[in-house]
């Protein structure tokens, strides 16, 4: 696939035009505004609690509300919830979330504006994580999918119900795993099989999501899916989200980096920011992200350049010289105005290292005046043919890429593509300037603007300046952004789901307790999951897992290996710490 096949314009903001579908009375896709949504955490059998929480989501600005319907009783109760909301004057579309139970989907489709089904669970059933399970011909497999979908599609047509095909990285069918492994290609194949089956049944009222907790996998997979749909000429609306993003600043930064990387290229018709917090807390974050990315339509396009060096479908670190410890095979560096944890710090027109060496920041016009290592501050307008030819000869410079427009991501990417085209091997540090005074707003905008550059491996470092935010907070934001994009880990990473009606323990307070005791374990990934539906698979990147297994019951995992089953919640955290100590990975804070 070519770099330009997944979107319409790499050099300016332009929404991808999809089919427009109706979800109840809400239009989605086409050139409709990007819609924001959340999911309740209540027991769907509890009508009053579910209605109250749905109203809080709606009042916060949520345009779609999803509820878990793991069984027939929950699916049937969607009728009562829908009627109660309408009686109170709320016509917001409701989505029933179904995994293993086709009969639940068929009931819910009568009372919900949209039903979400997960191909890996809907056809594949419970996971055995058996990679030898490819024991059925493709024709037989497609016949099975159609057999499962036919009664549901009939009901959806009768009730004008939309289907969301929701593929999750952590719940691919054993058959897909056997053919493709745990890969973006497998996720796309799973989605395209269901699209083919639905289209053969003359059903097109479809929204698609294809999610992962790893931002790299999520971004590269959605791009592959978009390219695959565009190649077939039938592009459906996309629901974007980073699953199990976590909570607090880390969850917001991770979501903004992943979702923002896609929205900047015009992908996405509805989004959910999944936080391990009250669901109504997700909505303001999602709205702010949509508003910010949408405003980039006002920024002018940049001139197109050769994009053949760009790898948007998989991570490919840009080839560059190593200068100091920047570029080459080194991890991305942080340069900060705060002489704290950063690798280098800014001062008096220089950038200084921890050991005291100082290197000047020069403009292209002063490049020849400096014979030693220097940081060369360059914007897109500086890149003349003569300057590019000069830069290509240098092996002792580090480029500080600067942007001036309201769409800095496009400028940064274009600068790097032009450097590649000209054979410039100098490492590139992103020089990002912000003036917003709210820390939360700063973190969201910086993450949305810069996430793509590190998800795709284009940049070798990051230098963020903001005189209205404490320098230590700016520095920590840079480190959290690098971690969110899987580029560099500076502390433990927590992969935690937002919870739903399937969660049978206090997930939010548990995540905070685990963070407090384990946050210092640099480089360790801990999955904290509400239930088993996505638990084992979605935390596939995690070293250890803490997974809900019943009322206040927890099972512990090392990777996908079950170690302790149905522990009381009071003892589960201590047991997990003991396992980490036995594995020799525990350090004292």
Image (cartoon, grey):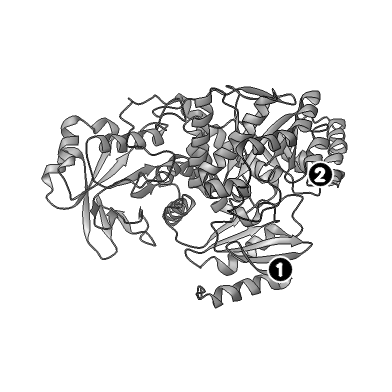
Inspect this view and state whether residue 25 appears.
Answer: yes
Left or right: 544, with 153 as reference point? left
Residue 321, position as x, y percentages in the image? 24, 50
Q: Which residue is located at x 62 percent, y 41 percent?
A: 167
Q: Quadrant of residue 204?
A: top right
Between circles 1 and 2, the one closer to the viewer is 1
Residue 538, position as x, y percentages in the image? 60, 52
Q: Which residue is located at x 51 percent, y 43 percent?
A: 184
Residue 105, position as x, y percentages in the image? 78, 38
| Residue under pointer 2 | 50
Q: Which residue is located at x 54 percent, y 43 percent?
A: 186
Quadrant assignment for the N terminus: top left
**Are dots 1 and 2 in contact, CB under 8 Å?**
no
Calculate the distance from the C-alpha at mark 1 to the C-alpha at mark 2. 30 Å
**Regarding mark 1 in the picture, which secondary structure is present there?**
strand
Left or right: 217, with 415 as reference point? right
Q: 512 or 305: nearer the eye?
A: 305
Residue 327, position as x, y percentages in the image? 29, 52
Q: Compared to 350, does 53 lie above or below?
A: above
Q: Which residue is located at x 75 percent, y 26 percent?
A: 24
| Residue under pointer 1 | 565
Q: Compared to 245, does 262 lie above or below?
A: above
Q: Compared to 544, does 25 lie above or below?
A: above
> Mark 2 packing: few (<14 Cα in 10 Å), some, or many (20+)?
many
Q: Quadrant of residue 414?
A: top left
Q: 337 or 43: nearer the eye?
A: 43
Of pointers 1 and 2, the one earlier in the residue sequence: 2
Left or right: 540, with 331 as reference point? right
Q: Quadrant of residue 334?
A: bottom left
């Amino acid at each position: 696939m070519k770099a330009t096949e997944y979107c319409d314009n790499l050099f300016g903001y332009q929404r991808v035009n999809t089919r427009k579908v109706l979800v109840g009375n809400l239009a989605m896709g086409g050139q409709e505004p990007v819609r924001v949504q959340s999911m309740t955490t209540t027991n769907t059998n509890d009508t009053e609690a579910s209605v109250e929480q749905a109203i809080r989501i709606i009042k916060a600005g949520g345009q779609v509300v999803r509820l878990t319907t793991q069984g027939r009783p929950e699916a049937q109760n969607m009728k009562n919830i829908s009627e109660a909301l309408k009686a109170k004057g709320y016509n917001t579309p409701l989505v029933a979330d179904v995994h293993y139970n086709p009969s639940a989907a068929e009931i819910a489709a009568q009372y919900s504006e949209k039903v979400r089904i997960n191909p890996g669970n809907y056809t594949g059933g419970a996971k055995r994580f058996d990679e030898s399970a490819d024991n059925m011909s493709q024709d037989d497999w497609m016949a099975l999918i159609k057999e499962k979908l036919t009664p549901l599609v009939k009901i959806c047509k009768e009730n004008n119900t939309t289907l969301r095909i929701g593929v999750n990285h952590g719940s691919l069918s054993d058959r897909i795993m056997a053919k493709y492994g745990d890969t973006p290609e497998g996720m796309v194949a799973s989605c395209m099989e269901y699209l083919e089956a639905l289209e053969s049944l003359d059903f097109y009222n479809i929204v698609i999501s294809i999610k992962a907790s790893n931002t790299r996998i999520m971004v590269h997979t959605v791009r592959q899916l978009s390219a695959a749909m565009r190649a077939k000429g039938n592009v459906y609306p996309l629901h974007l989200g980073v699953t199990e993003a976590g909570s607090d600043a880390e969850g917001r930064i991770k979501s903004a980096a992943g979702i923002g990387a896609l929205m900047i290229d015009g992908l996405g018709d509805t989004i959910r920011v999944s936080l391990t917090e009250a669901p109504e807390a997700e909505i303001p974050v999602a709205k702010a992200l949509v508003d910010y990315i949408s405003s980039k339509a006002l920024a002018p396009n940049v001139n197109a350049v050769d994009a053949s060096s760009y790898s948007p479908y998989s991570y490919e670190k840009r080839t560059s010289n190593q200068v100091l410890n920047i570029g080459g095979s080194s991890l991305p560096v942080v340069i900060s105005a705060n002489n704290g944890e950063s690798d280098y710090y800014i001062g008096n027109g220089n950038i200084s290292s921890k050991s005291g060496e100082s290197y000047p920041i020069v403009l292209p016009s002063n490049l020849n005046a400096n014979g030693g290592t220097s940081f060369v501050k360059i914007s897109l307008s500086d890149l003349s043919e003569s300057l590019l030819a000069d830069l290509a000869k240098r092996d002792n410079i580090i480029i500080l890429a600067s942007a001036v427009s309201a769409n800095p991501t496009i400028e940064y990417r274009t600068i790097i593509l032009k450097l590649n085209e000209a054979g410039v091997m100098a490492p590139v540090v992103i020089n990002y300037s912000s003036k917003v005074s709210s820390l939360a707003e700063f973190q969201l905008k910086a993450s949305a603007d810069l996430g793509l550059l590190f998800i795709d491996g284009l940049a070798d470092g990051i230098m963020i300046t903001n005189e209205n935010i404490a320098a230590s907070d700016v520095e920590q934001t840079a480190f959290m952004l690098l971690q969110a994009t899987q580029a560099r880990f500076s502390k433990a990473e927590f992969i935690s789901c937002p919870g739903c009606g399937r969660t049978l323990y206090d997930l939010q307070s548990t995540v905070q307790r685990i963070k407090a005791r384990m946050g210092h374990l640099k480089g360790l990934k801990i999955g904290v999951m509400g239930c088993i539906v996505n638990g084992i698979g979605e935390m596939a990147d995690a070293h250890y897992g803490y997974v809900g297994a019943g009322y206040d019951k927890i099972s512990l995992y090392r990777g996908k290996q079950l170690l302790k089953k149905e522990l009381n919640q009071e003892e589960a955290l201590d047991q997990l710490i003991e396992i980490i100590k036995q594995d020799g990975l525990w350090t004292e804070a």
